[in-house]
Image: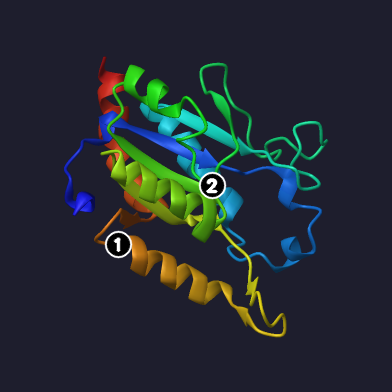
Amino acid sequence: MLYNKQVPIEQSALLVIDVQDSFKPLPRWSRRNNPEFEKNVARLVDAYRSAGLPVFYVLHSDEDPGWEKTSPYYKLMSFLSPRPDEPVLEKTTRNAFTSTNLPELLLEKGVRRVVITGIQTEQCCETSARVAADLGYAVDFVTEGTLTFPIAHADDPTKELGTDAIVERTEYALRGRFARIRTVADLEKELQGPKSLAQAG
């Protein structure tokens, strides 16, 4: 069970997955869950920067309107401002690993543990967590640093799965198999160690 793998926070990186304007023109944007999403992701970015640990951003592209690389919506949301040493990667798969050079970059930085945040909880975030675990990384899944939307039934659009059920299912599927479910406060507290070391040095 990989979530029990003990990897120090100093060997971790923060992944911010698909937090892009491509979602905003869609009708479902008004039905998003987690109104604290932006604040929670920003807190984690600040905590990782303060600890001197890596942050990676990932953008998703495909042929759907708003997701093409030529679209004006194909950009990070405005509350995110990557620093020059924080890569912005482009993916075409549901996970952040197999269509990018993220594994190489993590290897270069000695990263053995990844912290998953982004959009959507049960799609690109969960898929990235599963692939990361299979690749041998310890995985922290910060549910409150993700968001999602209700999902209509493919055969009966009058039925849908609500966001509470989606989040519960994702946590049930990941916990104890692919990841540890963490909070922003959990990681902020853990990151105080590296921050203190950096200040002492």
Q: Nearer the viewer, residue 91 or 9?
A: 91
* Mark 2 neighbour class, 10 Å CA radius: few under 14, some 14 to 19, many 20 or more: some
Amino acid bearing label 1: Arg
Q: Position of residue 62 (x, y in %)?
A: 69, 41
When the figure is inspected, residue 196 is found, relative to residue 142, above or below; the finding is above
Nearer to me, 94 or 46: 94
Q: Residue 1, relative to residue 169: is it above or below?
A: above
- When asked about the image quadrant of residue 20, the answer is top right
Tell me where residue 72 appears, x and y as whole percent: 83, 36
- Determine whether 174 is above or below 50 in the image: below
**Residue tagged 1:** 175
Residue 75 vs residue 160: left or right?
Answer: right
Q: Which mark is residue 94?
A: 2
The image quadrant of residue 12 is top left
Q: Position of residue 10 (x, y in %)?
A: 27, 30
Task: Report whether 65 appears left or right of 182.
Answer: right
Q: Is residue 188 among what the camera can see?
A: no
Placement of the C terminus among the 4 image quadrants: top left
Name which residue lies at 63% across and 36% down. 80
Q: Residues within 10 Å of mark 1 (few under 14, many from 20)?
A: some
| Mark sitting on residue 127 | none
Q: Image point 38% across, 52% down: which residue?
A: 141
Q: Secondary structure at mark 1?
A: loop
In the rendered structure, which amino acid carries the disc numbered 2? Arg
Residue 52 placement, left or right of 71: left
Q: Residue at x 21, y 35 (%)?
A: 8
